[in-house]
Amino acid sequence: MIAPSNDTALSRLMGPLVKPSVFDFWAGHLNSAWSWERPLARVVARRIEAQGTVTLDLKANRHCGAIQPGQHINVSTEVNGRRITRSYSPTRLSRSGKRLSITIKQVDGGKLSQHLCRQTQVGDALEIGPAFGDMTLPQGGAQQTDPRLFLAAGSGITPLMSLTRALDQVGLTQDLTLVYWARTRAELCFVAELRALAVRQPHFKVHFVLTQESQRLNGELAERLNAELLATLVPDLAQRRVHACGPAGFVDTARSLSLGHARSFLGEAFTPPPPLAATDAVGTVRINLALSGRTIEVPTGQALLPALEAQGLSLPSGCRMGICNTCACGKQTGVTQNLHTGDKEDIPTTALRLCISRACTDLTLDL
Ligand SMILES: Cc1cc2nc3c(=O)[nH]c(=O)nc-3n(C[C@H](O)[C@H](O)[C@H](O)COP(=O)(O)OP(=O)(O)OC[C@H]3O[C@@H](n4cnc5c(N)ncnc54)[C@H](O)[C@@H]3O)c2cc1C
């Protein structure tokens, strides 16, 4: 995909005459994805992928950066007058990188997933941030042909679908087994495509596992992820590189079943792990906002991002679980605790991840 650049003939010609925001306003009336400098993607098609799940096909403008299969992007749009950002993993990427699809599962009461699934229409524009995430394929070397095992639960299928499609595009020369859990058959995505791939590609196997379906059809399974199931489905686990994606508990189980038993493990959770039970997490602390000159009080037991948002601050955020760094800001003074690891930090930093940090004492932040 073309790198962001303002140095076009148009920018040089128009630069002295019009502000980028004014250009965007008028250009957006002609084409929703035309922008002076913002990375926008226009919805060119939408379809129901499964019960409660919608796929949006997007055409990106020239300011959008490259994305590798298995990576994620932050998607932003306005919902009820507020800009909301969440992370999504493209399920399809064209070779040029200009076209991509995202597949969104509606979450009950969810702000952006509901909006994308119900309100977003063909012609609408979404802002998309730079790609992030390490669950990608090697770009060469011996690892490229190692057998793999993909474990997906719920919307965790999305980056693994992108990886499966990418491997298929280059001929799938290594063994690949995909085990895909959903609650019911109606919630499974991409079934016809995955079954057809398993018929066409001798190296590819797919197993669908349904945890809340009374009847099993077409070789479907019903167990939760466990060691016996893996031993039956992939007797050669020790040779395989495992990729897992889904809720935090699922990824944790996949990690513990793979480490020491498989060749390698890469996992990414779409939901945050349960917060640490900190014994000193009671009461409130004062946060001095150095740039805006305000002081506010927040509960010490809550992650800083939702705590500051609850006080009316509109802060940049993305994955909200410590992966994408969008919410990182400077901390001048005070003690914070990483809610994932439990580690406490009392030294200043330029990149405090507000979504996974709580304040243990009064803080001064660069906000
Ligand atoms: C790296 C990454 C990649 C992701 N890729 C995809 C993707 O390709 N497709 C996709 O559908 N989702 C994906 N997600 C999840 C997505 O970012 C949002 O969290 C999800 O769409 C819910 O957002 P929301 O604004 O609708 O819900 P919110 O308004 O943020 O939350 C509403 C309620 O739902 C709960 N909740 C939030 N997220 C989830 C979730 N994922 N599952 C269950 N409950 C949740 C919250 O705790 C809250 O109670 C990804 C998440 C990450 C971190």
Image (cartoon, rainbow, N blue to C red):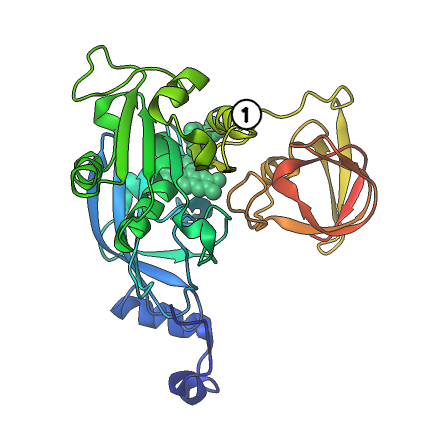
Residue at the location (34% across, 67% down)? 61
Front-most of 199 and 12?
199
Q: Is residue 82 left or right of residue 311?
A: left
Residue 129 sits above or below residue 61 on the image: above
Residue 192 against residue 130 in the figure, above or below = above
Residue 48 placement, left or right of 328: left
Taking the view exactly as shown, the residue that stands out farthest to the top is: 214
Residue 208 seen by the camera: yes
Residue 198 at what x, y percent from top left?
Answer: 21, 37
* Residue at image location 30% in from the left, 22% down from the top: 209
Left or right? Give the position of 366 relative to 151: right
- Count up the numbered dots: 1
Q: Secondary structure at mark 1?
A: helix
The answer to whether residue 16 is above or below residue 128 is: below
Task: Name which residue type carries label 1.
Answer: Ser
Q: Quadrant of ligand 1?
A: top left
Question: Where, by quadrant of the figure, is residue 34 drawn?
Answer: bottom left
182 left or right, relative to 344: left
Q: Give the labeled residue for mark 1.
A: 256
Q: Residue at 52% of width from left, 28% of height from top?
A: 261
Q: Position of residue 72 (x, y in %)?
A: 44, 49
> Can residue 74 be spotted in the picture?
no
